[in-house]
Image: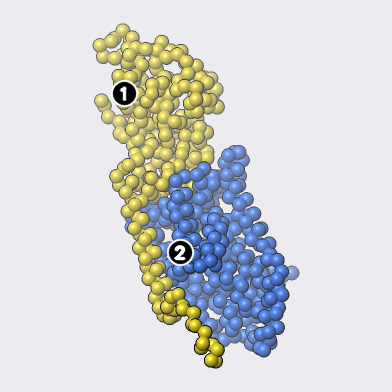
Chain colours: A blue, B yellow
Amino acid sequence: MSLLGDMVVMLGRAPRKPMHRTDAAEIAYGRKRGKGLEVARLIEELAARPQSHKWRNRRWAVLISINLLFTVSYWFDVQLVEGSLTASRFLGFHLADVYSAGIVMLAQWHVPVNLAIGAVTVFFLWALLGGRTYCSWVCPYHLVAEWAEMLHLKLAEKGLVSDHVFHRGVRAGFWLLFALLAFATGQTLFLALNPIGILSRAVVYGPSLALGWVAMLLLFEVVYSRRAWCRYVCPIGLTFGAIGAGAPLRVEYNLDACAHEGECRKVCEVPHVLDMTIKGRAEDVKNDVGPDCTRCGLCVDVCPTNSLRFQIKGLSQLL
Amino acid sequence: MADVSAKPEPQPKRRRLSRHQEDRRRVLRAGLLTLGVLLLQPLAFLPVVRRMQQRLRPPGALDEPAFLSACIKCGQCVQVCPVQAIELADMEDGFGVGVPFIDARKQACDFSCDALSCILACPTGALSHGLKTKEEVHSGIARLARPDACLARKGQGFHGHTRGERFRGLLRYEDHDRWNPVPVRKHDYDVPICDLCVRECPIGETALRLEPLPGHPDGKRMTPVVGKDCVGCGVCEMICPEEPACIVVDARAEWSEA
């Protein structure tokens, strides 16, 4: 799909069937015809293997290390990284969360130089690493939300709770709303509600009552709507998604061996980016997964046919 | 076929929604979610509008509403302060959550850093970079809140450690160690008439001085007088041996002759 099409899907439109498929894709689909039984057996065989958590474990290790680095740096006065995730200094260089910096500027009607430098630095960093990579590899809320999600799924399996889906477009609405409110009222409602800031400050400066708000969000996600904050609200995630739209680091879907059994979509925080794994939806044999992908690697871990892989675009051509 | 129809049909728990209905519900829920978040807005405004917390802010803080909105709530000011005077506010401050303040009685800003480190650390200018020296700071104004309890006014001296043995506050005693703040509880005082607030004022006598109490020209009974150069750092409030402090800082107050 085109980059523009990907962006529109990220903003909330439902993914559509491709208008046309490449010849290679047609051949790949053709080869799968009448092999239903064979594929079913293969999936069964693969499912019997122990589930790999390679990428999840690596990711959790990185996420926890980054967050603890802030704590350690402060408490032992290492001065490696000062501040918290909304704004910080890494070895003296300013870093600032792009969306948070943006609404502070909107609320003030003023662009502080250091804040702008920090935001631009972060912009380029994640433009390379793939915007929402921040979400799953850095954001502390993502980690606790993952645990809440596990609980939600367990309870849903027993029929105690069910997932209530929202229209994804609401996230773009919130993005605009928080920005407009900052501009109009001069106060940054988003920064007061932002569970990422609250958690990051709690990790660095110690617990606060505000953690109660984070607990309420998690409870909402457990009993009512799976991953609600990340899927339907977080403007930081949406901003990073747009920033990383053209990032070289991404998950690549390979149609050839795919059994279309849909394990990947079940574990995905943003299953609309994996729409191409539904039979007939892939445009080509090799496909880039869209910008809303957080590069969490859960689909890479779970895929029984290794059809989803991490890929650095341009690097494979070079090597 | 007959077998299948003979079996009792499992009753579906809920009527299955058509795709269109499901879509409509998604949009409806999205609308309700937006409304719910919007309702939080007045909750955050309430503490700000009602000034439930008139906090003493770190040096260079902009006007209160501007300060709250300019602050990105990162806490870099907290980290650079050599006496750890700065804390971050919690949920009850509404929009002020994560915004820095100083509890002067617990730990005042004594300008140990000399360079206004918190201002230099602030990435957003919520602590205004316009200030270069401590004399330009204007956090508030000290006020003698409990004149009757003031030792100087009673003509009493002070001996020993102020604030008790468990007090954790730090202060830089310049003639003792120019560079390192030390625990207040380790500093011995022995003064014939209590002048701790005046003695430790980082600004000097244009900010806070002792004057003979009217009617007592012999100097046996004195009173602290706040001058127009008071910056509201809060050292006097921290150091006052009486409990609660006789002299306190009114955050964001303006100096007036009185």
Disc 2: host chain? A
Q: Which mark is residue A224?
A: 2
On the same chain: label 1 and label 2?
A: no
**Viewer-proximal residue among A115 and A255:** A255
Q: Amino acid at mark 2?
A: Tyr
**Residue A285 in the figure: left or right of residue B255:** right
Q: What residue is drawn where x is 60% and y is 47%? A: A69
Q: Give above or below for A72 relative to A280.
A: above
Q: Amino acid at mark 1?
A: Arg
Q: What residue is drawn where x is 62% and y is 56%? A: A60
| Pointer 1 with pointer 2, Cβ within 8 A | no
Q: Quadrant of residue B126?
A: top left
Does the rendering let one see residue A57?
yes
Q: Position of residue A15 (x, y in %)?
A: 51, 77
Residue under label 1: B146
Disc 1: host chain? B
Q: Give above or below for B2 relative to B83.
A: below
Q: Secondary structure at mark 1?
A: loop
**Residue A204 in the figure: left or right of residue B92:** right
Q: What residue is drawn where x is 40% and y is 38%? A: B57
Q: Position of residue A229 (x, y in %)?
A: 47, 61
Give the mark toward the camera: 1 or 2: 2
Q: What residue is drawn where x is 39% and y is 56%? A: A106
Q: Which mark is residue B88?
A: none
Quadrant including the C terminus of chain B: top left
Quadrant including the N terminus of chain B: bottom right
Q: Give above or below for A38 relative to B175.
A: below
